[in-house]
């Protein structure tokens, strides 16, 4: 599920490889696997990220959504940044 040959640009999280429905970020110091979801007309976003090295998951569920993905994923991106910079995943 994590073997990929397709690269896609995510509006917030940058370029990611896509396995069988799983986004793979192996271009940074910490490899992350995950999936995002957004349904603007129903008003929610979700992010599920998994860090294999530390067996850690980060799940964000938000009950508000905007047509602008940067705004919709603002809190998820902020929490991810805090985690990545904290050193807890090393």
Image (spheres, helix red, strand yellow):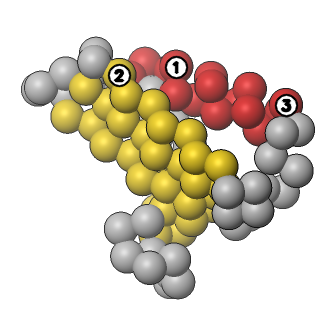
- Mark 2 residue crowding within 10 angstroms, few (<14) / some (14–19) / many (20+): some
Give the quarter of the figure containing the N terminus. Answer: bottom left
Image-based side of 61 in relation to 88, left or right:
left
Q: What mark, if any, has residue 16 been given in the picture?
A: none
Image-based side of 63 in relation to 43, left or right:
right
Image-based side of 1 in relation to 68, left or right:
right
Image-based side of 25 in relation to 87, left or right:
left
Above-or-below relation of 22 to 77: below
- Mark 3 and mark 1 lie on one chain; the one further toward the N terminus is 1
Residue 40: quadrant of the picture: top left
Disc 3 from disc 1: Cα separation:
16 Å
Q: Mark 3 points at which residue?
A: 86
The residue located at (43%, 19%) in the rendering is 71
Whole-percent x and y of residue 47?
43, 40
- Mark 1 residue crowding within 10 angstroms, few (<14) / some (14–19) / many (20+): some
- Mark 3 residue crowding within 10 angstroms, few (<14) / some (14–19) / many (20+): few
Disc 2 from disc 1: Cα separation:
9 Å
Observer-nearest of 70 and 32: 32
Q: Mark 2 points at which residue?
A: 62
Whole-percent x and y of residue 42?
12, 26
Whole-percent x and y of residue 77?
58, 29
Q: Name the residue under label 1.
A: 75
Residue 63: quadrant of the picture: top left
Of helix, strand and loop, which one carries label 2? strand
Residue 53 showing in the rendered view: yes
Disc 2 from disc 3: Cα separation:
23 Å
Above-or-below relation of 61 to 52: above
């Amino acid at each position: 599920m994590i073997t990929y040959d397709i690269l896609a640009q995510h509006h917030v999280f940058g370029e990611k490889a896509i396995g069988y429905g799983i986004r793979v970020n192996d271009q940074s110091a910490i490899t992350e696997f995950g999936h995002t979801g957004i349904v603007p007309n129903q008003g929610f976003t979700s992010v599920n990220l998994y860090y294999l090295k530390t067996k850690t998951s980060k799940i964000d569920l938000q009950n508000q959504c905007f047509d602008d993905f940067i705004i919709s994923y603002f809190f998820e991106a902020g929490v991810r940044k805090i985690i990545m910079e904290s050193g807890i995943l090393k």
